[in-house]
């Protein structure tokens, strides 16, 4: 209720939109802001400070074509499709608050233009869950990765996995189909990725086949949340994981039973041969005794 009141108050103060998004401490979030004007202006992301000021967290130059970073913040402006994205990493409880997606010019007297409002609520999670899980894979083998999400909030949203490359996170697979395995597209080896969104258990699985050393790195399990129709805002909740890919043979547990049976077979064979030899020796001994007895009887006569 408190958050709702804050958002309503800021809407009354003249904000274009006021939407409440949820983040999780220790994780990351990507906020996408659409715009219809100010294409040529520099974009920025600011947080409400004292006396209703807007403390700038990051700004992107008009001339920049790539992601720009400042501390835990990164910003990318797509002027062709008229949106910009802001990435916030390693969230903390103190990051909660009201933010603006804004634009401003570089000329004298060309001030800031506050656009989309968003209230970020960062929730605490268990300390151990903040550490990214580490998966161990082997070249030429397959691996399955499990990504959990809040079933009550994100059941119907699009799930995806991306790989962290420099500042940006490049999609490996992104699908909105539920409760069935779906494959990625066929470009750049992405066909080796498949995804299953389990809307009963609140998790999705990503399977990677025929691993290579290039697959190693940092990945993000993502949930893409779109708000109401024509909303200028969407948000991605991200959970980090690390994939290590090792060279060399991998211990195949499926071979263990066959090795055990082979070992037992050898033992049985040796035991059988030993029994045969012992039986043969006893037989020869009996023949020898019988021969000696016959000789003694012959001498006696």
Image: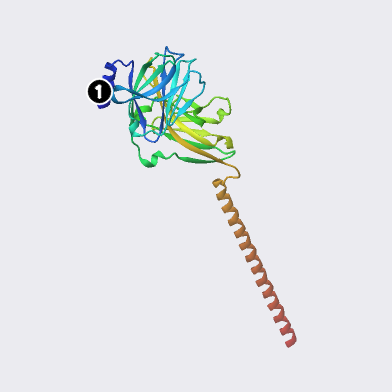
The reply, left or right, for residue 77 in relation to residue 21 is right
Residue shown at the point (61%, 63%) measured from the top left: 271
Q: In which quadrant of the rendered image does the C terminus lie?
A: bottom right
Circle 1 SS class: helix
The reply, left or right, for residue 188 in relation to residue 146 is right
Closer to us: 28 or 237: 28
So how many labels did they put on this image?
1
List the residue tagged with mark 1.
5
Closer to us: 257 or 265: 257
Place residue 50 in its image quadrant.
top left
**Res. 1 in view:** no
Tell me which colouring the rendered structure shows. Answer: rainbow
Q: In which quadrant of the rendered image does the N terminus lie?
A: top left
Q: Position of residue 221 (x, y in %)?
A: 45, 32
Q: Position of residue 238 (x, y in %)?
A: 42, 31
Residue shown at the point (30%, 15%) measured from the top left: 14
Q: Where is residue 263 in the image (x, y as percent from the top left)?
A: 59, 56
Is 27 located above or below residue 10 in the figure?
below
Residue shown at the point (29%, 17%) measured from the top left: 11
The reply, left or right, for residue 178 in relation to residue 274 is left
Residue that protrudes farthest toward the bottom in the picture: 300
Q: Position of residue 92 (x, y in %)?
A: 36, 34
Residue that protrudes farthest toward the front in the picture: 108
Place residue 239 in its image quadrant.
top left
Is 94 located above or below residue 279 in the figure?
above
Residue shown at the point (56%, 46%) measured from the top left: 252
């Amino acid at each position: 209720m408190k958050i709702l009141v804050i958002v309503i108050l800021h809407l009354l103060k003249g904000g274009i939109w006021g939407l409440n998004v949820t983040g999780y401490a220790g994780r990351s979030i990507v906020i996408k802001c659409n715009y219809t004007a100010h294409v040529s202006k520099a974009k920025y992301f600011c947080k409400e400070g004292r006396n209703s000021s807007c403390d700038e967290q990051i700004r992107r130059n008009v001339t920049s074509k790539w992601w720009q970073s400042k501390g835990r913040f990164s910003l990318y402006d797509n002027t062709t499709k008229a949106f910009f994205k802001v990435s916030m990493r390693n969230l903390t409880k103190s990051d909660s608050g009201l933010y603006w997606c804004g634009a401003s010019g570089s000329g004298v007297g060309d001030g800031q233009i506050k656009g989309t409002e968003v209230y970020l609520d960062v929730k605490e999670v268990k300390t151990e869950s903040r550490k990214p899980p580490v998966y161990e894979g082997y070249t030429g083998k397959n691996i399955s990765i499990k990504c959990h999400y809040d079933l009550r909030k994100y059941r119907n949203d699009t799930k995806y996995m991306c790989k962290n490359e420099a500042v940006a996170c490049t999609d490996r697979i992104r699908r909105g189909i539920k409760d069935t395995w779906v494959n990625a597209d066929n470009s750049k080896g992405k066909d080796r990725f498949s995804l299953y969104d389990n809307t009963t258990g609140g998790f999705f699985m990503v399977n990677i086949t025929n691993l290579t050393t290039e697959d190693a790195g940092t990945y993000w399990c993502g949930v893409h949340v779109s708000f109401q129709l024509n909303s200028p805002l969407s948000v991605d909740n991200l959970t980090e994981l690390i994939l290590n890919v090792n060279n060399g043979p991998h211990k195949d547990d499926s071979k263990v039973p066959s090795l055990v049976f082979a070992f037992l077979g050898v033992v049985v064979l040796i035991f059988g041969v030993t029994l045969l030899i012992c039986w043969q020796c006893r037989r020869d001994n009996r023949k020898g005794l019988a021969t000696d007895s016959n000789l003694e009887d012959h001498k006696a006569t």
